[in-house]
Image (cartoon, rainbow, N blue to C red):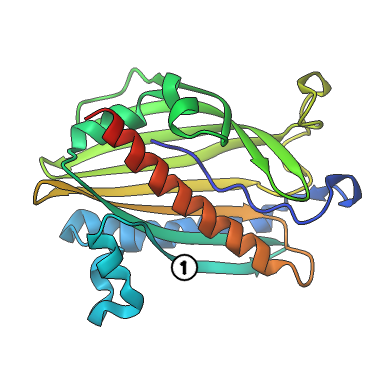
């Protein structure tokens, strides 16, 4: 999948932010949150084919209308501190007219072209199909070199994911991308400086899971992405920034994926 995850916002210069330690309790809090999500939306889609945007009643905030116009719509699901960390989760949906599941599958598994599809987010991208893959459950291990630049800081990560592309039926497809390793580069401008030990870095991003729920309907694709990440707690007064960056990243992910699909039609 587009295992493009959301790099939690860096709010201050890295040089003045102390190194942070990922505690087992913090990691467990994220894992528990992911488990609850998988038992909810992820499982519900497999049973009913319903997306988050379907539940927006009475055209609330214009979201269904924007979705029907092929524009991305997003909503915060969770942005709060937990056990010496912070979880950010946004849902986003977009419709792509004239697209098929096979088109989005081609894009998401085309790792050599990720740098073209997702400009500015990556330094490199690799994906390897695993021997246990089947047509119904395509299994990949991927390696993405994530690049995050804000007004205050640049952060880069060597990230690894376990990715499953599952075909539920002829009209529905799901993707689960779970991070297995995140290591921050010590100097984003000098790869030779090496990487911090995992879980012993500035704590901008420790874990990330991304899920795509996709259905083919009425001559197009309805796509939902859920992206959830674990970071250190935001400094007092800066929590809004992590939330904004997460929302902006989901929005960009949807727009970039739509544009990539349209480029391969």
Q: Nearer the viewer, residue 259 or 17?
A: 259
Image x and y of residue 2, in percent: 42, 37
Q: Is residue 114 left or right of residue 160?
A: left
Badge 1 element: strand
Residue lying at 25% horizontally and 59% vertically, measured from the top left: 69
Image x and y of residue 201, in percent: 78, 42
Q: Nearer the viewer, residue 172 or 249?
A: 249
Q: Quadrant of residue 52?
A: bottom left
Eyeballing the image, is 192 above or below 143? Answer: above
Image x and y of residue 183, in percent: 69, 34
Q: Quadrant of residue 139?
A: top left
Residue lying at 19% horizontally and 49% vertically, measured from the top left: 215
The answer to whether residue 233 shows anywhere in this view is yes
**Residue sitting farthest toward the right:** 16
Residue lying at 28% horizontally and 57% vertically, measured from the top left: 43
Q: Which residue lies under the disc numbered 1? A: 77
The answer to whether residue 27 shows anywhere in this view is no
Image x and y of residue 94, in percent: 31, 54
The C terminus lies in quadrant: top left
């Amino acid at each position: 999948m587009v295992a493009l995850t959301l790099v939690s916002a860096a709010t201050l210069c890295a040089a003045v932010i102390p190194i942070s330690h990922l505690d087992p309790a913090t990691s467990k809090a994220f894992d528990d949150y992911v488990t609850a999500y998988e038992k909810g939306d992820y499982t519900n889609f497999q049973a009913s084919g319903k997306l988050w945007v379907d539940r927006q009643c009475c055209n609330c905030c214009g979201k269904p209308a924007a979705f029907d116009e092929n524009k991305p719509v997003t909503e915060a699901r969770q942005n709060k501190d937990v056990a010496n960390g912070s979880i950010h989760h946004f849902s986003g949906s977009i419709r792509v007219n004239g697209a098929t599941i096979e088109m989005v599958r081609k894009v998401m598994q085309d790792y050599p072209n990720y740098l073209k599809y997702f400009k500015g987010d990556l330094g490199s991208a690799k994906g390897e199909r695993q021997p246990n893959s089947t047509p119904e459950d395509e299994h990949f291990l991927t390696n993405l070199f994530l690049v995050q630049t804000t007004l205050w800081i640049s952060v880069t990560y060597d990230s690894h994911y376990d990715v499953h592309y599952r075909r539920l039926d002829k009209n529905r497809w799901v993707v689960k991308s779970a991070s297995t390793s995140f290591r921050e580069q010590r100097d984003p401008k000098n790869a030779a400086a090496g990487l911090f030990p995992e879980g012993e870095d500035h704590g901008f991003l420790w874990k990330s899971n991304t899920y795509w729920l996709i259905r083919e309907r009425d001559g197009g694709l309805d796509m939902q992405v859920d992206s959830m990440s674990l970071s250190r707690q935001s400094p007092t007064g800066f929590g809004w920034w992590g939330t904004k960056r997460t929302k902006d990243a989901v929005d960009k992910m949807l727009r970039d994926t739509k544009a990539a699909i349209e480029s391969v039609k």
